[in-house]
Image: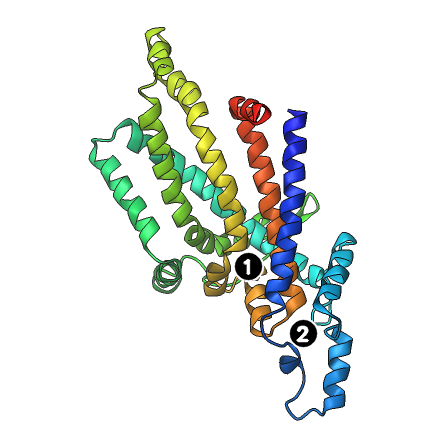
Amino acid sequence: MTAFVIRRLMQAVLVVFLMSLIVFFGVNVIGDPVDMLISPDADQSEIERTIRALGLDRPIGEQYLYFLKGVASGDFGNSFIFGEPALKLILQHMPATVELALVSLIMAVILGIPLGFIAGLHPERRLSRGIMAASILGFSLPTFWVGLMLIMLFAVTLGWLPSTGRGDTAVFLGVESSLWTRDGLGHIFLPALNLALTNISLVIRLTRAGVRETMHQDYIKFARAKGLPESRVVGVHLMKNILIPIVTVLGLEFGGLLAFSVVTETIFAWPGMGKLLIDSLLQLDRPVVVAYLMIIVLFFVIINLVVDILYSALDPRVRLGDRDA
């Protein structure tokens, strides 16, 4: 197990290094931030002074090495627009995005797995067919349209829930979050549901497929032949084996929720990293964009590493096959 983890860590370091190359050089070929920061009437000396102040007069390779040196010490550079460290700006917006992604993932698990079990255990029932039809809608409907419809129904027509903002926050166990207040929970429900719909549909289909495939395995038949109660057969023998693909997919989807919640955060005016990214892209604030992308890369790498470890814990054949390879 230790060798398996070490191998994955070495692969993670290589991935982060390669992605830093792609992200840095990719972002630096987009536009000229100087055009956004100075007046069109500025003279040449002022333009050159701004370029030197931003470090844009150095060769691109030297800028990259300077960037790597800064990253090693936790410094992603200062925002061109706000004049503050880019990492500080992202960390200020990160808690809102993380809590939104967590609530969305919890919704996907709480709703998706039970509904998938129902659809898999009783596929011929009308309820099961209705669940699968709803899962297709969850995949098909665009996120921005669903978000607007949720606002129209629950905020405008019924007036049950707020439509924008994060709501009140409170500190519990040293963590400030909107999840600790009733007002915060009311604000997070709609954006989290909007963000979770695709994942709920995905979990339903994964769970149903896993149940249908596993129900016919010999060990399930043997467990029933031994006289084990159906609750134990389903809750232990069946559940443990279908969790492997679900854990893998949910781990990857959590990274996607963190990285691609831009549309939901924009519709619901949620003050997370997605909104900061949009503002930075519009103003060509390169340090913030690069810092955001690198942090998302780190998120994905860490999540994949955790998923690999959990996967190997659930199925020892994974680490054994890795060792043989």
| Quadrant position of residue 291 | bottom right
**Residue contact at pointers 2 and 1, CB within 8 angstroms:** no
Residue drawn 62% across the image and 42% down it: 302
Q: How much space separates mark 2 and mark 1, taking CA atoms?
A: 24 Å
Q: Where is residue 252 shown, x and y percent of the image?
A: 51, 43
Whether residue 93 is visible: no
Q: Which amino acid type is shown beneath numbered disc 2?
A: Ile
- Counting other residues with Cα less than 10 Å from the Cα at mark 2, is it few (<14), some (14-19), or many (20 or more)? some
Image quadrant in which the C terminus is located: top right
Sequence-first disc among 2 and 1: 2
Kind of element beneath mark 2: loop
Q: Nearer the viewer, residue 172 or 43?
A: 43
**Which numbered dot is residue 97?**
none
| Nearer to us in this view, 118 or 324 | 324
Q: Is residue 291 above or below residue 225?
A: below
Mark 1, Cα crowd under 10 Å, few <14 / some 14-19 / many 20+, is many
In the picture shown, does residue 84 fall above or below 174?
below
- The residue labelled by disc 2 is 81
- Residue occupying image coordinates x 56% and y 30%: 310
From the viewer's perspective, is 261 left or right of 133? right
Question: Is residue 293 at least partly visible in the picture?
Answer: yes
Q: Quadrant of the N terminus?
A: top right
Say which residue label 1 marks. Answer: 166
The amino acid type found where label 1 is placed reads Arg
Q: Position of residue 170 (x, y in %)?
A: 64, 52
Element type where label 1 sits in the image: loop
Question: For the point 69% across and 91% down, which residue is it?
Answer: 42
